[in-house]
Amino acid sequence: MNLVLVRHGESEANFENYWTGWLDVDLTEKGIEQAKTAGNKIKNHGLLIDVAFESVLKRSIKTAQMILQEAEASFVPEYKTWRLNERHYGALVGKNKDIIAEHFGAQQVKKWRRGFDEVPPLAKDNHFDRRYNHLDPRLIPTGESLHMTSQRVLPLWQDQIAPNLLDEKTVLVCGHGNSLRALVQFLENVPTNQVDQIEIPNATPMIYTFNSQLKIIQKEIL
């Protein structure tokens, strides 16, 4: 029972150092190569992916599709879900991180980025497209803490990821820094005051092997 967690490759926002959240930005050329390399690492490790989960943001979707292509698994089912979206950074979205740090201070920015319950300044309006039309508007945030992000990610684990693992499928989850941080915290039972120590590098496969009770018996980083 193998779970492969991969954060998307470098995005335009990563390169230009601004807050992204649910903003739909593309991969850089470096990000594309990182995704292909991740796929090759998974293939060379001997893993055969059976099913993939992605966010509804193209940096996640493209990364997953390139991983599947390189890992010779382009044919497997792919499920796109808002539950894997990056944490919604509210009014900070689109703002340069260095400028925000100068204005609010490095400590406050660290709390917004890595704190568990810290909520960023809320956005006044969300200007989202039809990919969210099927959702109850009350589910769409105007800003999230990591705790809130975790509350929307974990139902995906319970309802879809865990059942696939119990069916002995190798599952790829291609998400974002904070949606994967929330999942790692849950899987590894990391205390909330240590969440800031969880690192999720771009396009670096993390492989969890579980027993039949979904207890972790091995973790590898490729």
Image (spheres, rainbow, N blue to C red):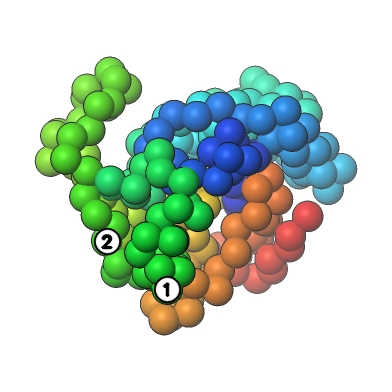
The location of residue 107, given as percent across then percent down, is 42, 73
Foreground of the two, 189 or 178: 178
The quarter in which the C terminus is drawn is bottom right
The location of residue 172, given as percent across then percent down, is 60, 42
Q: Is residue 60 left or right of residue 15?
A: left
- Name the residue tied to disc 2: 119
Task: Name the residue located 22 percent from the left edge and 22 percent from the top edge.
Answer: 133
Q: Is residue 27 left or right of residue 193?
A: right
Task: Name the residue located 45 percent from the left edge and 35 percent from the top edge.
Answer: 55
- Classify 79 as above or below 153: above
Question: Crowdedness of circle 1 by 10 Å Cα count: few (<14), some, many (20+)?
Answer: few
Task: Name the residue located 36 percent from the left edge and 42 percent from the top edge.
Answer: 93
Task: Name the residue located 14 percent from the left edge and 34 percent from the top edge.
Answer: 137
Identified by mark 2, the residue type is Val
- Classify 7 as above or below 178: above
The location of residue 72, given as percent across then percent down, is 77, 27
The location of residue 197, given as percent across then percent down, is 55, 74
- Name the residue tied to disc 1: 107
The quarter in which the N terminus is drawn is bottom right
